[in-house]
Image: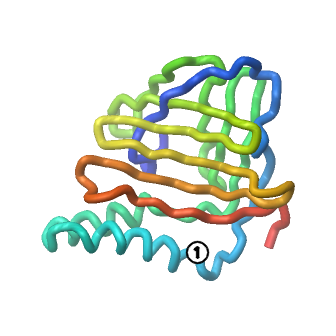
Amino acid sequence: MKKWMVTGTLLIGLSSSAFAAPVDGQWYLQDAGSTQAKLDAAVDSVAKEMNFFVRMIARPILEKEARICHQWQLSTQAKQWQWQCDTEAAETIPLNANRFKTQGDDDREIYSTFHQTANEVDVILESERGKRTNTWKMLDANTLEYTATLESEKLPKPLTWTLTYTHTKP
């Protein structure tokens, strides 16, 4: 798993892995000019509730986790679902596993969950460090909303941000 992931992923199998996820495709970030401000506001919202000394250490870590993907490549394969941020290595999750276990870059155990509905895919990554929920949701035929939520007992509240993507390259 990538270093940027706070947690691992637990997986709930689908009744049929032959169907493409509603969000499959290549998606490009919209309103890139205001994106960093959105992420900064999300980090500030969590950091301001921390002790001053903890805040100094936590803020750079939160900023690293709240990263921007300019392009998502999302794809249903024969037995797995795959997501890729920009040119990083693709992440995959089996479609038929109830609980998928992997090792993180720092050798921690990560458990993965995959859930698909008519217009959304959720991937939840959990480890001893906390939980990261990635949600890709179709708003309409050409608009995808990506929401990431980071939860940890070390955070005073979840860190959440939402970005919008379309099929059209800016």
Relative horizontal placement of residue 70, taking residue 76 as reference (left or right)? left
Relative horizontal placement of residue 78, taking residue 84 as reference (left or right)? right
Instruction: Give percent across and percent down for residue 82.
Output: 67, 37
Tell me which corner region of the image, top left, top right, bottom left or bottom right, holds residue 98.
top right
In the displayed structure, 20 sits above or below 36; it is: above
Relative horizontal placement of residue 156, taking residue 68 as reference (left or right)? left
Relative horizontal placement of residue 164, taking residue 25 as reference (left or right)? left
Report the residue at 39% width, 42% height from top.
Answer: 131
In the displayed structure, 44 sits above or below 140; it is: below
In the displayed structure, 108 sits above or below 134; it is: above
Report the residue at 76% width, 45% height from top.
Answer: 23
For the image shown, how many numbered marks are present on the structure?
A: 1
| SS of the residue under disc 1 | helix
Instruction: Give percent across and percent down for residue 70.
Output: 66, 64
Camera-side residue of 14 and 167: 14
Q: Which residue is mark 1?
A: 35
Instruction: Give percent across and percent down for residue 54.
Output: 17, 65
Q: What is the three-letter code of the residue carrying label 1? A: Thr
Report the residue at 49% width, 20% height from top.
Answer: 99
Q: Quadrant of the C terminus?
A: bottom right
Instruction: Give percent across and percent down for residue 10.
Output: 49, 28
Report the residue at 75% width, 52% height from top.
Answer: 138
- Binning the other alpha carbons within 10 Å of mark 1 as few (below 14), some (14 to 19) or many (20 upward) gives some
In the displayed structure, 163 sits above or below 99; it is: below
Image coloring type:
rainbow
